[in-house]
Image: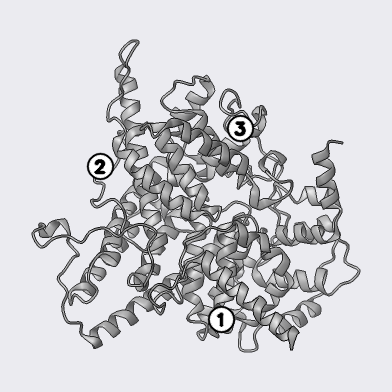
Amino acid sequence: MRHGDMMIQTRLNSERHAQHVLLSSLMQSNASFDDMVDFIAFSVARNPNARLPNAALLRQLRGQQTNLKGIRNLLGYTQPPPQRRIAIADLLSDQTSSSSESGRSSMDEPDNEDISKTPMEPPFRVPAKPWTTLTDDDEFVSHLISLFLEWVNPFFRPLEEDLFIRAMQSGDLNSEYCSPLLVNSVLAYACLYSEQEGAFFQPDDYMTRGQHFHDEAFRLWHLEEGRASIRNVQALCILFTNCVIRGKDKLGVSTCAVLTQLSRDVPNTLQRPSGPPPTLEEKTEYQRARKAVGWGAFACDMATANTILQPAWHTTCKEDLPTLSELAPLTTTWTGYPLHNKSDYLDKNIMFIQNCRLLQLTWRAQRLLYASDRSDPHFFNHVDQLTQEMLAWKESLPESLQFHGRLPGPVYDLYVTIALYSLYQPLGDAQLSPPHPPPTEPSTSAPENQYPYYAPRTQPDIDSQALFAHTMRGRAITTAQDMALKMGNFRHHYGLKIIPPYFVQANGIACFTLLQDLSTPSSTASFKEAFRCLLGAGMQLLWARGMARMLHLTAKNTGIKLPGVIETMLEKVADTAWSKSDAEMLSSCWPNYVIAKEAKVGESVMMEDLIRKWEKLAVDEEEGKISK
């Protein structure tokens, strides 16, 4: 046995580690919050004879989507008798909650069969060499590339799938559409969705998955010396998103600034200093990839602006919407690899075009919310007008993109991005310290149509402002409740081992929005679902884990009473949900939306700073009690 295997075996034989893996798998399953609480209460916390899984059983929990029944069958746990389940629910649920408010719905009823799937074959076959020096396993690399192209690229689309796969299969290091930097960037991201051994940097440590490819990608980027090319911008777009969900969004923000500028410098036409001139087909392919990566950079800029509540670096909106005639025909089936052995209809080109249109609306919303004067008496009319325009666009979506019981995974990203606009409406005037200088305000000589939502400062009408704030807050709460339902829908069908790129951001905002309305039963029920999904995502993504931790600390330090069932759950999974090393790894500028508006000048409201501040305060208080 190799030394690394011995280390893994030692950790897996640890009882504490076994419970950690079991709880992590449970929270990444498709179980509802209440069913998860029942399982922990009956099978783990209150049953001293409950058998913890051995190494072989723990391995079986990896790499597959499993429901609660499947976990029970695998571990040999019995189903709690009905009367026992009722007693547990009575004990752990809030006394004021009713069955309609408990977070259960018809979609949370146990399925008739275990939904674990036989492992699928990767839909894309590509070689490891010459693209990465960190592995020569073609099967593993094909697995990771397939994960990225199935779950990330259909919505985000930094890569033109056909051009990238063809170039990677060719092994041509001089290709315009593939490079070691780009491949290592993709592998780093895809590792966050994989439970194969090669994905882990530290054995069995989910927070370090893909770190080796991530570090290698940044090393290769430094060797590029800032060269503007399609494949370099593609790589930086992927590294940006990778940094953010790893809880390194400070690095992500600075990476976004670089890629935004770099995308402007990429040549508009295919240029070859030597050799035969490019053919018409090659020129057309280049133009297609050039446009796609331009929109990818624009999407990263919008995501950064939404994270730090500041206007995007793009001071003008992109207008070159892609058309179907420009895009190459792609497969219209989505396999759900590696979770589902079936094909769902998904027109990736239609998805891309609609996402670009949504990005245009998002840019306008950001200029309106973050760069205009909220005391303008016409401000609310501007907000309402844009809201109606977004609703009209949403209603006009093709039938395949309309929300229904079960959508292909990437389509959920479309809906969480739509929701962000309403969720951010009450937050645009938050007092935040931006990681980069804010854009210069337009001069009075600027044409009015250049800044359609900018207005000279006027004396605010207190009553109008209060009504406006109340209306926007109501919209945000309604949207957060709707988002919790959609998150629960995704959780039920897919579990939480694989999380769409924009899911965590919307999940965190929904939780913080609902946290301020827990006196309302409907918001309490929605908060339970949203927080359950955030905990599940936090089992493998540091950004989500930090959000859940900051949410809990915010409630403690602001006097907000969380639902009793959530406090109980947090007690049972405390060691699994957060550790001291997590705080050391976190480097996040994500703001605390509950306290942002009341923050004093110079006071940080960023996740990283607040968690460290509040945890130190808790330690100091505990030491003070001991010394007395």
- The tag earlier along the polypeptide, 1 or 2, is 2
- SS at circle 2: loop
- The tag earlier along the polypeptide, 3 or 2, is 3
Q: Which residue is mark 3?
A: 142
Q: CA distance from mark 3 to mark 1?
A: 47 Å
Which disc, if any, is residue 557?
1
In-image side of 250 versus 90 (left or right): left
Residue 49 shows in the view: yes
* Residue drawn 56% across the image and 41% down it: 214
Which disc, if any, is residue 408?
none
Label 1 vs label 2, nearer the camera: 1
Q: Which residue is mark 2?
A: 320
Query: What amino acid is at disc 3?
Result: Ser
Given the current orientation, which residue lies at the most extreme front position?
A: 627
Q: CA distance from mark 3 to mark 2?
A: 33 Å
In-image side of 603 versus 20 (left or right): left
Label 3 vs label 1, nearer the camera: 1
Residue 545: quadrant of the picture: bottom right
Q: Position of residue 333 (x, y in %)?
A: 50, 40
Query: What amino acid is at disc 1?
Result: Asn
**Counting other residues with Cα less than 10 Å from the Cα at mark 1, is it few (<14), some (14-19), or many (20 or more)?**
few
Q: Position of residue 184 (x, y in %)?
A: 55, 35
Q: How is the image coloured?
A: one colour
Depth check, front residue: 553 or 479: 553
- Please report contact status of discs 3 and 1: CB closer than 8 Å, yes or no: no
